[in-house]
Amino acid sequence: MIKILSTEQVRKADEYTIKNEPISSINLMERASKKVAEWVLHRFSKKFKVCIIAGSGNNGGDGLAVARILNGYGYKVYVLLVLGGAGSDDFNENLDRLKNLSSVNFVSKAEDFEGISGEKIYIDAVFGSGLSRDIEGEPAELIHTINQHYGVKLAIDIPSGIYADKHSTGKSIFKADHTLSFQTPKLAFMMPENYPFVGEWHILDIGLSQEFLRQVDTDKSYFEARDYREKAVTPFGHKGTRGRATVIAGGFGKMGAALLVLKGALHSGIGLLTAQVCPPSVNVVQTAVPEALILQDENDYVLGTLHDYSNQDVLVMGPAIGNANKTCILLREVLSSYNGQLVLDADAINILAENREMLEMLPKNTILTPHPGEFSRLVGKAENDFERIELLQSFCKKYQVITVLKGKYTAVCSAKGEISFNSTGNSGMAKGGSGDLLCGIIAGIYPRKKNTFETVKLAVFLHGLAGDLAKSYLGENFMTPSNIADYLSFAEMNLDE
């Protein structure tokens, strides 16, 4: 995992590295700037003209160093200085170094860039993550003008105008196609509200102290492939070793949801799989998923019968079960009596939202998997994405549950309030049934993992990776949740390699 650090923690990481490597601040800036310049060099030919907008702080110092290095690589470089008082020491040092190069062109206003012929790259190095207030006045007008210019737009560290750790309230924000940040991602990158400005973000390793990064405490992280840890099944294992799961899903006429849960569990390694369904739906399950056992509900069209689930490692309840009175009573009885790992999704979450006293009955470490709409009904509406994350943490800590808030960077929150953002997945997965499949994957993995938070993080990652593979072969419009299930095996094989 990559720790997501606050602006203050990143500042301390810089200070620790400078003191203990040791390295001077100007040389650490040089190292970071060289990484940015190399990123540009490897992706853009020298036919591109480089237009750098630099503020007078350390972000501007980065920009000036990048200008000098790219000039040395043979790019035609133009620099616009946005001076707001005395510059930082490292900014002034890099400005002196740059002014000694007659091949670098300084311009006086943003409109001067328009007169430059050919393809252009605009690099934002105005404010960075040190921004403390909304951008106004001439800098705001400058950013607005640059946003209108045609060309590739890059931001160093973070687009000017965005706050790294909180909701951005300003109207003047640089719109980057790519954001090149250092060592660790910013919390702002995980928020849907910031995507129009951040674009695609990339983390550049600038050699900040690994000792500091190991020791620093944070409750937010980013889950990557290197975090994958699968517990091998013993060669002497059997069906029971792989675990037992029962799925209560799919009311009459909605059996697709149940089938996707079952397939997710089956293709994620479960040993014994049972489906509780209404009598008219028995043949649907036995035909589509012959591996699943049947636990027949006593009701023809409503799921409402409490069975003995005591020998089940995992119980999944919710996808397409509806909200009939008998179903609500069944959920209440499950909460009162079941002692294994419980996974609640979709209609089960909506029932909780309508019967809030049931929240107090949730067993510790129950897994909830809402999409944003279900989350709002359950937890409350948020004014912005940062507030939604705060609500998520408070909810999980209050009720001691694990919650999966699905989205681009799906957030998995532990009962302690720790949040892991997921690194896989794509917009082709934004189709009915993807969440049902995820429930099944969680159920399939848990009996081997036996750690709820780790299980969910891994399941979300594999689910997204299978989706990415489906997209690469089929395209995001053609792919379906059923395809994602088919690519689960390839996802696991990719990780094993």
Image (spheres, rainbow, N blue to C red):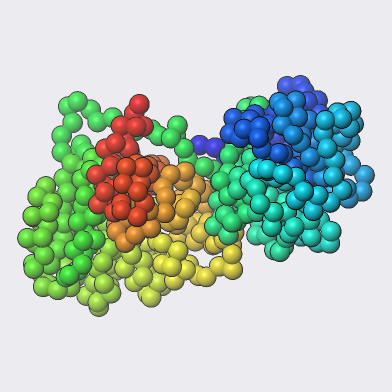
- Pinpoint residue 204: horizontal percent, then vertical percent: 62, 33
- Quarter holding the C terminus? top left
Q: Is residue 277 left or right of residue 458?
A: left
Is residue 217 shown to the viewer in this render? no
Q: Is residue 76 above or below residue 479?
A: above
> Residue drawn 62% across and 27% down?
210
Out of 281 and 429, give the one closest to the viewer. Answer: 429
Out of 100 and 399, give the one closest to the viewer. Answer: 100
Q: Is residue 132 above or below residue 74?
A: below
Q: Is residue 27 above or below residue 149?
A: above
Is residue 252 shown to the viewer in this render? yes
- Pinpoint residue 73: horizontal percent, then vertical percent: 71, 26
Q: Is residue 214 above or below residue 423?
A: above
> Residue drawn 66% across and 52% down?
150
Q: Is residue 479 left or right of residue 9?
A: left
> Residue drawn 68% across and 49% down?
159
Q: Residue 71's quadrant in the figure?
A: top right
Residue at the right extreme of this rendering: 86
Residue at the top extreme of this rendering: 22
Q: Residue 240's quadrant in the figure?
A: top left
Q: Residue 302's quadrant in the figure?
A: bottom left
- Pinpoint residue 273: horizontal percent, then vertical percent: 17, 49
Q: How many marks?
A: 0
- Pinpoint residue 176: horizontal percent, then vertical percent: 64, 49
> Residue drawn 37% across and 61% down?
362
